[in-house]
Amino acid sequence: MDQSAGDDPEEAKSVRRIYLDNSATTAVAPEVFEAMRPYLTENYGNASSIHWYGQQAKAAAEKAREQVARLLNARASEIVFTSGGTESDNAAIRGIVEASRAEKKHVVTTVIEHHAVLYTCKALEKRGVEVTYVRVGPGGAVDPADIERALRPETVLITVMHANNELGTIQPLEAIGRIARERDIYFHTDAVQSVGKIPVGVEQLGVDLLSLSAHKLHGPKGVGALYVRKGTILRPLLYGGHDDRDRRPGTENVPGMVGLGKAAELAMAHLEDTAARVGTLRDRLERSIVERVPQVSVNGDPAHRLPTTSNLRFDYIEGEGFVIAMDLRGVACSTGAACSSGSVEPSHVLSAIGLKPEQARSSVRFSLGRFNTPEDIDATLEILPAVVERLRAVSPHYKSAAVGEKGLGVRD
Ligand SMILES: *Cc1c(COP(=O)(O)O)cnc(C)c1O
């Protein structure tokens, strides 16, 4: 019998590596690394110290704050540095809810949020906060009218992500922002996936709070930011000294901030290039797969999504098996949310757009970034059809389906 996917260790050793999992994390850009280096070596001061070392660190942190603010079209004073997207989401949602003195509190969100938002909402529910999880359409987008219908007099916060991490679907934030403003309700967005890939302006979107994370835009891991509109009162998550303007205590992660600042500056410079060049690569990858491989469908809404993401459903294969087989041949992709790898539960996002569990499990995400080349796409396309064919050849469902096509039964 034919050997299973690329189990030859010699082959694995010499394999050319292609990274198509940029929604999980990205490579640190060389310029980012260089910008951070002095703050890990000679300029190691504590940004709260008054001596030369401290002043160097302080100046670098403030410059980074400006760089992040510019990317969002916000003011530097509205940027709070955090440890990443997860903390930013927690700080925004818990910060607003816990600062509210109302007796009854209600939050409106969607069913397809990242777990950093969903689990924060679940934790608040245990403490008596009511949460409405608004459903999405088959493309993965929420209808602003459904958000409006979910609002109650006691709604203190609307939190809707900007672009979904699994599908890339972009949510109609401007319309939701107008609704929030009319009703005077705080509006938070998890923009971790969209920042650096598409224009993100806090005024245009009408948000009061916005989460972003450095490692999703070629910055370092473990640092992010929360945009907090001037005048918004949050209850802090942490208490302590050395505050980031009384909002986030702890000795500042100056190298991380500098890395995020540089990553933001580079993202801004590359914004058009990402949309055009990377979008073209993504489209070619997707179109070629659909042309060359039978029974493949695109999940989500191709007309309203990030230029970097393609979520495909390969009928009769297990996404996990596909990811492993592709990895053995050097291509890194994903079954969706990195945190659901190894779990048997199908993705909550794919379930929410109406996929059956077996359809969700046969789905795979390719996510591109600005370091991908046309050669990466060529090499992936060379490998992929044979991988799908091999996996289907050993799938009992595929065999019975093939029989079905010959007229002996109905394919599911
Ligand atoms: C990655 C991600 C997060 C979490 O960010 P971390 O910096 O890894 O904590 C939150 N939301 C979305 C949409 C993400 O993709």
Image (tube, rainbow, N blue to C red):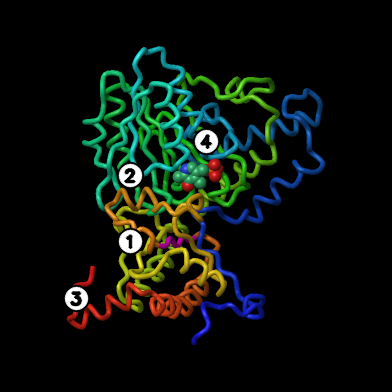
Q: Are marks 2 and 3 in contact (CB under 8 Å)?
A: no
> Residue 268 placed where, x, y %?
51, 48
* Residue stretch rendered in magenta on the structure: 364-368
What kind of residue is marked 2? Gln
**Residue 378 shows up from this direction:** yes
Q: Indicate which label's residue lies in the foreground, 2 or 1.
A: 1
Mark 4 lies on a secondary structure that is: helix
What kind of residue is marked 4? Ala
User: Horizontal placement of 23 versus 147: left or right?
Assistant: right
Label 2 CA crowd tier, 10 Å (few <14, some 14–19, many 20+): many
Label 2 to label 1: alpha-carbon separation: 23 Å
* Residue that carries the numbered disc 4 in the rendered image: 69
Mark 3 lies on a secondary structure that is: loop
- Relative to 318, residue 13 above or below: below
Q: Earlier in the sequence, mark 2 or mark 3?
A: 2
Dominant secondary structure (helix, strand or loop) of the stretch shown in magenta: strand
What kind of residue is marked 3? Gly
* Residue that carries the numbered disc 1 in the rendered image: 359
Q: Earlier in the sequence, mark 3 or mark 1?
A: 1
Looking at the rendered image, the quarter that the C terminus falls into is bottom left
Q: Indicate which label's residue lies in the foreground, 4 or 1.
A: 1
Q: Are marks 4 and 1 in contact (CB under 8 Å)?
A: no
* Residue that carries the numbered disc 3 in the rendered image: 409
> Residue 100 placed where, x, y %?
41, 16
Label 2 to label 3: alpha-carbon separation: 41 Å
* Residue that carries the numbered disc 2 in the rendered image: 171
Q: Is-magenta flag for residue 365?
A: yes
> Who is closer to the viewer here, 355 or 140?
355
Mark 2 lies on a secondary structure that is: loop
User: Horizontal placement of 11 versus 392: left or right?
Assistant: right
Q: Indicate which label's residue lies in the foreground, 2 or 4.
A: 2
